[in-house]
Every structure is written in C-alpha cells, then in structure tokens.
Image (tube, rainbow, N blue to C red):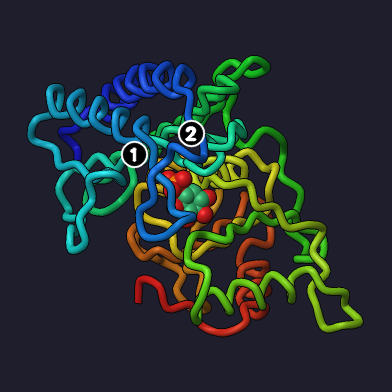
Amino acid sequence: MSNVNLQEVHDFLILVAKKAGHMITSAKPTTSSSGEKKNSVDLVTETDQAVEKMVTESVKEKYPDFQFMGEETYKPGDRLTSAPTFIVDPIDGTTNFCHGYPYVSISLGLAIDLKPVVGIVYNPFTGTLYSGILGQGSFLTDQFHDHVRLPLKDPEPLSGLDKAQIAVEWGSDRSGNDYDVKVNTFRKLCASKEDGGAMVHSLRSLGSAALNLCAVASGHIDIYWEAGCWAWDVCAGWVILTEAGGEIVDANKGNWKPRIDDRRYLAVRKGHGQKEIVEEFWNNVQGKLEVGL
Ligand code: IPD
C-alpha cells in the first residue's frame, strides 16, 4: 500500500467526480425510459452506463495496473482481491435520479488489501463533495463549507436508540427472509416502549447508501442500517465515515469487523457510547439477515 500516492488518487478522483457530475446533471432521465436489472425496482439508466464507461476509461488510463469493480460492469462471481481496486458506483441513488429527487451521488472508492483507503462521494445536484483518505481525515465542501473536517460538530454522546435518528433502506428485494427481517426491525425500532419498541426519534429512507454514510460521518444521522447493498455503494463512504470517527459493523449481531463486500452494514457516527448503541441496535434486529452469508 505504501507506494500508492493516496493524495494523488484522491485529487484525481475529485476531477473524475466533477466530470461525471456534468454528465449526471445534464441528463434527462425518466422513470419510463429507465431499464430494469433484477426486477422492476432495480433501475439502470443510460447515464449510469455512460458515467461508468467514462470513469473506467479515465482510471485505466491513469492507473493501468489497478483493478476495477463497478456496479454496471460487475458480473456474478467477480471477487475483490487485495490488489489496489477502484470500487465505483456511477450513480448511487438511481431511483432518485429517475424521479428527479436530488439525493444522488457518484461514489468513487479505492481499496487496497480489501480495506477502503480513499473515498469521494459527490452530489452534483447540490454541489456537495465529501472526501476522505485513510489516516488523513474526511472533509466536506459545499456552498456553506470549504473543506471542513467531519464530523461537523462536537458529537453528543450516543445515549440510546430512543434519542437516535436512523437511516434505513428498503432495497430492491421485496420478499423473503431478509425483507421480513427488515420490515419487522423497522416496526420494532419505531414502536412505542409500551409496545416493546425502541421508539427511535425517526427512520429516514433517502435512497443513496453513499450519502447515508456521509450523513453519519457528518453527524446528521446517528445510525445507518442496511442489508443488500454492495461494495460500490459503501467503499467511498466507508473511508469518509471511519475517518470521521464512525464505525461500521455487521448488520447482523456479533460481527464487529465486516468485509467491504459482506453486503450487511451497520454504521454509527462518532460519539461516546458507540459500542453500547451497536449492541442495543443488534438486540432490536428481528431475525438474521442472509444476504452475503
Ligand atoms: C442503491 C442505493 C440505495 C440502496 C440500494 C442500492 P443504486 O444503489 O444505495 O440506497 O438501498 O441497496 O443498491 O442502485 O442507486 O446505485
């Protein structure tokens, strides 16, 4: 890892993200013109494919020896290796993109030895840029912040789920064990204490895993829980969150050190009480998630 210039990769990926941003904001997607992958809610647009092509060509030209994994060119059976690997989601939040809802990002990560080391997450509709380098912190630049270190404020203690704002996602698998685990867990988290629930402040389901991780890094969201998303949804946000003092553990109880491609994630912001709130959350998960096992 030591001979890769992470700062140079970081600066290069920001340029690529900005170029992708122009492609994304100038596109005119519609829900009727988008394509479907696994099912009718797993969407893909021509812009996803065009951005991934541009990103692939750009990084292969500059870093010909690095591996590449991207959402739109991934094939079942492709495995991450310990080699330096760009892990890329050209549009994270494709459903939002199709509907014109501006919670959309391009997510550009680099992993070495299966560990995320550089992350860039850029929302071109709001001009919000999150960036992080392993060991060097993570930062936000937008119209109100000029390269401000994350988290954005001194974190309050994580004093319990009943004080927490939590992001979850419905995902595109809408039946089976994991769907039941998710829906039953959502109900348990929100329900009143009298009914045996955790009575969290709120659940948010905004539609971009990468931006959710950045919201946890910033401190706007206390916890993000998801099963079913992929390494390209989380690689860049992983660096940004952990460099902001956050933690990522398994969405299932017991595993404190998930792999980047385990597809089950529980992310917690910086703050005293991380371990306790992870354990409290795990005790509210209704069953065992099977994706990625
Ligand atoms: C999706 C988003 C969504 C998450 C899904 C992802 P995509 O990525 O991150 O929030 O719930 O699991 O697949 O398809 O928009 O790139």
Helix, strand or loop status at disc 2? strand
Q: Looking at the picture, does residue 26 appear above or below residue 237?
A: above
Asked whether mark 2 and ligand 1 are closer than 8 Å, the reply comes as no
Q: Position of residue 181 (x, y in %)?
A: 58, 78
**Location of residue 246 with respect to 289 vertically, above or below:** above
User: Which quarter of the image is occupied by the N terminus?
Assistant: top left
Q: Is residue 191 left or right of residue 78?
A: right
Q: Is 59 displayed left or right of 269 in the figure?
A: left
Q: Nearer the viewer, mark 1 or mark 2?
A: 2
Indicate left or right for 95 with 53 as reference. Answer: right
Q: Is residue 238 in view from this perspective?
A: no
Work out which quarter of the rendered image holds the C terminus and state it: bottom left
Instruction: Give the quarter of the image for residue 148.
Output: top right
The three-letter code of the residue at mark 1 reads Gly
Measured in 3D between alpha carbons, the distance from the residue under mark 1 to the one under mark 2, in whole angstroms, is 13 Å
The residue under label 2 is which amino acid type? Answer: Ser
Q: Which residue is mark 1?
A: 109
The picture places residue 197, in percent across and down from the top left corner, at 80, 77
